[in-house]
Image (tube, rainbow, N blue to C red):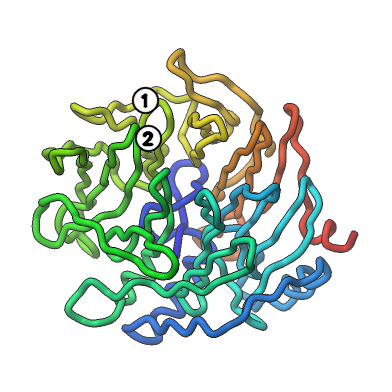
Amino acid sequence: MGRIFSWIGTVLSVPVGLCFGVACLLTVASASCGEAADQQGTAVGKTQPQPEIIKRIASLSGYARFGFSGLAFGAGRLYVATNIGLIELQGTSIKSLHTWYPSDDVVEGPWFDETSLWIQHVHDGVLRRLDDAGWHPVALPPPPNAYGYYTRRDMAEGFHVTSDSTGPRLIGADHVWAWKPPDRWSIESSPAAPEYSGSVGVAFFRGREARIMRLGSCFGGPLPCDYAYYWRGGDGWSEARTLPLARPRQVLGTADGIFARGDKGELVRLDDIGAVVLETPGPCEAIARTSVDKLTASFVGAGIFTLSPEGWTKVLASPYGPSEGEHWAYLAEKDGVIAYATTSMPTHDGKREAGTTALWVAEAGNWTRIDVEQAAKN
């Protein structure tokens, strides 16, 4: 599930099979209760009115604070993943809260393909897909290992969905699967790589796939992992190209190429010959693909920018003030409307929060801050 993104000043948006954010903290805690992940998937989704948001925030345990873990536009709505369920907005108005359990309703995602919205629920590990007919539970594919189950590490690092014109892909547990409607995942081949390597990201550009791989096993060691990317075309997989990121956090494809963001705020473009480190207005905390297939990015303290062949163009200033502390950040865009959310990182002593937990929506160049608790009362 997961994501927590931390690095120089704040953090990011969507994961590349790594563990981040509010939801991840609870994921690790729940996964540690047993080595295998138990996919129940029997909970039925409920659409709750706004007052349920206030009730659920108030009922969070003492060590948990309300926070966001992702957002996406789709079907004329903005969907926001939180640790109390999935909030649905129209414009700047909260419409409802989607829930599955009386408590522990931590949601990862959301991700959109051409027809559906996808989430993963931390409580049971099950994927859920929303279309015109409603919510559908979607089990994870059979574990691609000798154990017969997903390990704690698999579940803590998380799964996420991405898609291109050929349909959704699921990334997690070092593998990639393609969605085969109505209810099946088909495992995809991986490039030749050192033993214990694993797929952590995938994106598409002009009909070609770029696969990001962790090289070998490096978990728990004193040195950072090594990463590489491979192109797949009609002749199979290319040779490995070095990925100059200490840890990749997001990868996505646009009309201008494939881009990957790292946990130190770096941003690279994956070219045929090698990765190009981009000059940026500041440390990059989140990236997203726009509705016109361009890259948009949030930079710590600098604001929201879009990238064209001519360079970066500033779209909006950062909505928070100059004294803002560390936070995780999430970004989405649809038809010129930008949504941006932050969740405060705890300080090292755990006694106070460093940054802001807030949700903003911008249209026509102006930010509107959405106070979730206050909006739920209206």
Outermost residue to the front: 182
Q: Nearer the viewer, residue 211 or 353?
A: 211
**Disc 2 residue type?**
Phe
**Kind of element beneath mark 1:** loop
Q: Residue at x 60, y 65 (%)?
A: 351
Horizontal and vertical percent position of residue 167: 41, 51
Q: In this picture, is 95 found above or below 234? A: below
Checking the image for residue 259, the label placed there is 2
302 sits to left or right of 199: right
Horizontal and vertical percent position of residue 39: 43, 82
Checking the image for residue 148, the label placed there is none
Q: Nearer the viewer, residue 63 or 277?
A: 277
Q: Nearer the viewer, residue 355 or 106?
A: 106
Q: Residue at x 60, y 30 (%)?
A: 303
Q: In this picture, is 172 found above or below 12? A: below
| Cβ atoms at labels 2 and 1 below 8 Å apart | yes
Which quadrant holds the N terminus? bottom left
119 sits to left or right of 99: left
Q: Earlier in the sequence, mark 2 or mark 1?
A: 2
Q: In this picture, is 149 found above or below 49? A: below
Residue topped by disc 1: 278
> Of circles 2 and 1, which is in front?
2
Q: Residue at x 19, y 54 (%)?
A: 190
